[in-house]
């Protein structure tokens, strides 16, 4: 048996035994590249995800809401940072990863290409989008790659308040004035389906899923996670008298699952491939920040070099 | 973009102490141009919720670590030195304070 | 003749509005900063400022006893009723402008709150003592950036020099103390502020020198009047954005 084959066997045996893989351990090249792709997409999503919510920071309706929204968007920057660092343990360079994003070579979650049109969107994003992210990240906290698992663990801890602050906004508006109720129902209608798409294509259509699950990078399939999210969310919607925009939604007594209608995958692939309502705005905002910041990064570096010389 | 000398600054490892008497533990990494900024960034990135009372920052490149091939010669020999553990020794049960 | 309560209310508005408007400006950076680590740093400072403002305006509302809250003070006043200095309402500009604005303000509030934390008004003293710790950190952050930008590259030096040149016109107002502060000093509610301007000048000039930044136009025209509600046109736009939602649905709870 070739040594490569032997190492692969040992690697897979360790994963099957529930061991974590650490940066310096032997790993198949494919495991490394798949992880870099997946972790950097996750990181990019956090960073681009700052924009739709950041859009309402300056208009938040009270000082308390303003502070929690800033803290939440700031957390997302932190989460992006943790994740980039996790990708860097695999030999990637944050600069290259960011360049890939800005040059349109890397993907990020399709959800952040939808516009935030009213304050209710901030509540619904916290409830749906962070809710979905928590379902996903709780699984990823058990991922076989140590640094990725640890990053997700930290993210889950911190994101606890994100969903709660979102639901608090939703609940407050749902029992508020008629205009507020209308606003929040409208936001639910707009965000529900894109939130379900966040888990990615259905298992049969997801090219990377099987491999990622074999190596326990992911432990559950896209469809299972999506179902878990729906099951969690339906009762939460009922509790505040909001209607999820799916006429096919019904409870299955046998499986104890909430069965939901057909997802518009055409829309998903359109948006993920660049043709969503806000793709261009999001990318140009990120590019502008990056380009405007270049002289700042250079100045700090130049100063550090001068100081060493002196 | 890639034609310039632009970087994301060098990588640092961050260790935080959560309370007096506790050891400094690895919290994660971040990027900074120098030690002072690494400290400031560490404070903002890894102590937003009051997780630290003291922070160490170390350039990642200054850390020397064992490799996986070191694992067996480094650590396995310590596994069977049972005389380093108190359970190895038998003393009369009636004697207290040992 | 105003009462001591009215003077204290006015003084708290000045302090609270400074922090609110600056915190708002800093929050505009969120998601757009030069590097991820700095995005997080600016958001932290913004949060501190808005937190301080919230506490100060709450105390102001309690002292006023007219049923207002920190939110009604923040969201339902007109630009001319805001008492912040013009320095903090200036748009962010580039990162050098934001840092220079922050540094000039940080030195000011560092010295100011260092004194006010000894106020005989227990709530004010408590708020100021907590704020002083936060400000001490803000000052460290902005000072370190002043050095890096001033003594970094040719471009960063030029940008910071321009920012300081442009901002100097707003610096007299920091010390535009009038009957409001005088009354509170006389009533021994706050310590004398007389030495503040000189201390500020010394601290600022020391850092500017270290950052290799020159004061070309120390004697330039200086704006005045914002403590009485005279502002630049920027404040109206800032408030229009900040207050739009709260004002569109004045009876709603959020």
Image: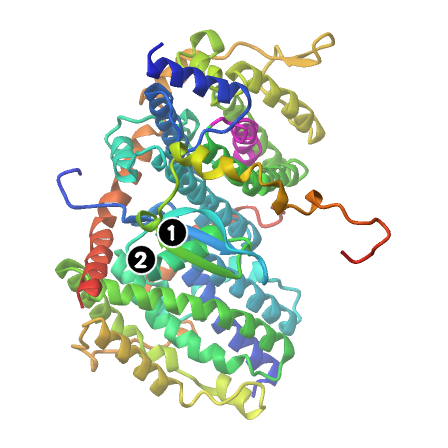
Instruction: Decide if residue C6 is on the left or right side of residue A276.
Output: right
**Element under disc 1:** loop
Q: How is the image coloured?
A: rainbow
- Left/right placement of residue C197 relative to residue A11 reads left
Q: Is residue B69 magenta?
A: no
**Residue C162 against residue A129 in the figure, above or below:** below
Q: Is residue C169 above or below residue A15?
A: below
Name the subunit of mark 1. C
Look at the magenta stretch and give its main secondary structure.
Answer: helix
Q: Which residues are magenta?
A: A122-144
Proximity of marks 1 and 2: CB atoms separated by less than 8 Å: yes
Q: Quadrant of residue A43?
A: top left
Question: Quick one: label 2, few (<14), some, or many (20+) residues within 10 Å?
Answer: some
User: Does residue A130 appear to the left or right of C144 in the view shown?
Assistant: right
Would you name the residue on which mark 2 appears? Answer: C92
Query: In the rendered image, which quarter contains the N terminus of chain A?
Result: top left
Which residue carries the number 1 mark?
C28
On-image quarter of the C terminus of chain A: bottom left
Q: Position of residue C209 (x, y in %)?
A: 22, 77
Check the image and name the residue furthest to the bottom.
C186
Mark 1 and mark 2, same subunit?
Answer: yes
| Res C133 label | none
Relative to the observer, which residue lies in front, C78 or A56? A56
- Residue A123 lies in magenta, yes or no? yes
């Amino acid at each position: 048996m070739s040594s490569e084959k032997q190492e692969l066997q040992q690697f897979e045996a360790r994963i099957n035994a529930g061991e974590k893989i650490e940066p310096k351990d032997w790993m198949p090249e494919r495991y490394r590249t798949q992880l870099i792709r997946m972790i950097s997409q996750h990181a990019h999503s956090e960073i681009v995800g700052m924009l739709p919510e950041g859009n309402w920071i300056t208009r938040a309706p009270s000082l308390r809401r303003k502070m929690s929204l800033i803290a939440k968007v700031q957390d997302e920057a932190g989460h992006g940072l943790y994740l980039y660092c996790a990708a860097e343990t695999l030999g990637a360079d944050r600069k290259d990863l960011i360049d890939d994003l800005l040059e349109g070579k890397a993907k990020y979650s399709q959800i952040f290409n939808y516009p935030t049109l009213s304050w209710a969107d901030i509540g619904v994003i916290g409830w749906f989008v962070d809710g979905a992210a928590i379902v996903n990240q709780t699984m990823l906290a058990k991922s076989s790659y140590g640094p990725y698992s640890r990053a997700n663990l930290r993210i889950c801890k911190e994101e606890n308040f994100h969903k709660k602050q979102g639901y608090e906004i939703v609940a407050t508006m749902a029992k508020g004035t008629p205009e507020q109720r209308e606003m929040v129902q409208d936001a639910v209608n707009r965000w529900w389906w894109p939130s379900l798409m966040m888990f990615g294509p259905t298992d049969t259509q997801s090219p990377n899923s099987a491999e990622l699950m074999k190596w326990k990078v992911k432990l559950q399939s896209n469809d299972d996670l999506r179902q878990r999210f729906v099951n969690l969310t339906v009762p939460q919607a009922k509790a505040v008298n909001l209607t999820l925009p799916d006429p096919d939604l019904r409870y299955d007594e046998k499986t104890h699952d909430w069965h939901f209608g057909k997802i518009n995958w055409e829309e998903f692939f359109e948006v993920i491939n660049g043709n969503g309502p806000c793709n261009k705005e999001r990318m140009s905002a990120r590019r502008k920040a990056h380009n405007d910041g270049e002289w700042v990064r250079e100045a700090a570096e130049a100063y550090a070099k001068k100081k060493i010389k002196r | 973009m890639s034609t310039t000398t632009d970087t994301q600054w060098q990588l640092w490892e961050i260790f935080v102490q959560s309370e007096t008497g506790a050891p400094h533990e690895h919290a994660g990494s971040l990027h900074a141009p120098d030690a002072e900024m690494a400290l400031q960034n560490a404070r903002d990135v890894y102590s937003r919720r009051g997780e630290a009372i003291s922070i160490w920052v170390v350039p990642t490149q200054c850390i020397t670590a064992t490799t996986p091939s070191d694992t067996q010669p480094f650590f396995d020999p310590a596994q069977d030195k049972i005389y380093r553990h108190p359970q190895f020794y038998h003393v009369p049960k009636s004697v207290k304070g040992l | 003749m105003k009462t001591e309560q009215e003077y204290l209310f006015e003084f708290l508005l000045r302090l609270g509005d400074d922090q609110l408007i600056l915190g708002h400006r800093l929050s505009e950076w969120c998601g757009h900063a030069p590097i991820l680590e700095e995005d997080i740093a600016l958001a932290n400072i913004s949060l501190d400022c808005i937190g301080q403002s919230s506490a100060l305006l709450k105390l102001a509302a309690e002292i006023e006893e007219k049923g207002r809250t920190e939110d009604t003070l923040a969201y339902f006043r007109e630009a001319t009723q805001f008492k912040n200095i013009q320095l903090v309402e200036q748009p962010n500009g580039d990162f050098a402008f934001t840092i220079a604005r922050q540094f000039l303000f940080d030195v000011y509030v560092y010295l100011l709150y260092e004194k006010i934390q000894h106020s005989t008004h227990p709530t004010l003293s408590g708020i100021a003592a907590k704020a002083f710790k936060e400000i001490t950190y803000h000052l460290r952050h902005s000072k370190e950036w002043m050095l890096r930008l001033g003594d970094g590259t040719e471009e960063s030096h030029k940008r910071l020099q321009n920012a300081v040149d442009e901002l100097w016109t707003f610096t007299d107002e920091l010390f535009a103390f009038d009957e409001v502060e005088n009354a509170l000093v006389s009533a021994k509610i706050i310590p004398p502020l007389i030495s503040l301007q000189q201390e500020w000048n010394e601290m600022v000039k020391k850092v500017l020198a270290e950052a290799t930044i020159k004061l070309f136009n120390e004697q330039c025209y200086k704006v005045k009047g914002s403590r009485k509600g005279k502002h630049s046109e920027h404040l109206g736009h800032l408030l229009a954005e900040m207050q739009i939602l709260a004002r569109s649905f004045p009876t709603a709870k959020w």
